């Protein structure tokens, strides 16, 4: 399992650190050889968070939902809810809003 994030984005790096403390997953800052091996372009890695586990490829809010499900407890319930319409529609919108404004959440622009 690999979590691919934008390693040039301070907000993304902080989120990846938070996840690394809670979920057993390999982390990739979305650069170079990792991207080629995983079959992602640099644009895809910069645009969305990716969860890749063999043939399973999730991005955006679906990747976040998978992380939450793997955390267990109440997080598992939240992650499951995030994949069920109409909550999934709201989750997708929220993800796009946060991703599009992530530079505003840190001092250093991404």
Image: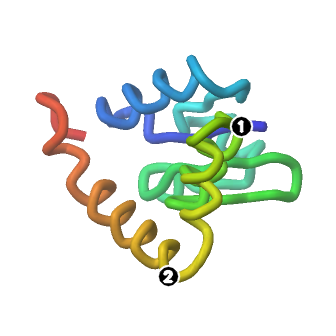
Q: Nearer the viewer, residue 4 or 20?
A: 20
The location of residue 98, given as percent across then percent down, is 29, 55
Instruction: Measure the C-alpha gap from mark 2 to mark 1.
Output: 28 Å
Q: Earlier in the sequence, mark 2 or mark 1?
A: 1
Residue wearing tag 2: 86
> Image height check: is 41 above or below 25?
below
Q: Is residue 48 above or below residue 25?
A: below
Which quadrant holds residue 90? bottom left
What is the crowding at mark 1: few (fewer than 14 residues within 10 Å), some, or many (at least 20)? some
Q: Residue at x 30, y 30 (%)?
A: 10
Disc 1: which residue: 2
> Disc 2 vs disc 1: which is toward the camera?
2
Q: Along the line of sight, which residue is nearer the eye, 44 or 83?
A: 83
Q: Residue at x 78, y 37 (%)?
A: 1
Horizontally, is 13 left or right of 1 in the view?
left
Is 92 left, or right, of 72 in this rendering? left
Which residue is nearer to you in this view: 29 or 82?
Answer: 82
């Amino acid at each position: 399992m690999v979590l691919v994030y934008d390693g040039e984005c301070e907000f993304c790096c902080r989120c990846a650190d938070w996840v690394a403390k809670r979920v057993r997953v390999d982390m990739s800052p979305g650069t170079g050889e990792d991207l080629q091996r995983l079959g992602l372009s640099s644009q895809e890695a910069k645009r969305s968070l990716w969860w890749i586990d063999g043939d399973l490829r999730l991005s955006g809010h679906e990747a976040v939902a998978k992380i939450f499900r793997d955390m267990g407890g109440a997080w598992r319930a939240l992650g499951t809810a995030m994949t069920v319409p109409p909550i999934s529609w709201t989750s997708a919108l929220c993800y796009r809003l946060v991703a599009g404004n992530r530079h505003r959440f840190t001092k250093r622009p991404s």
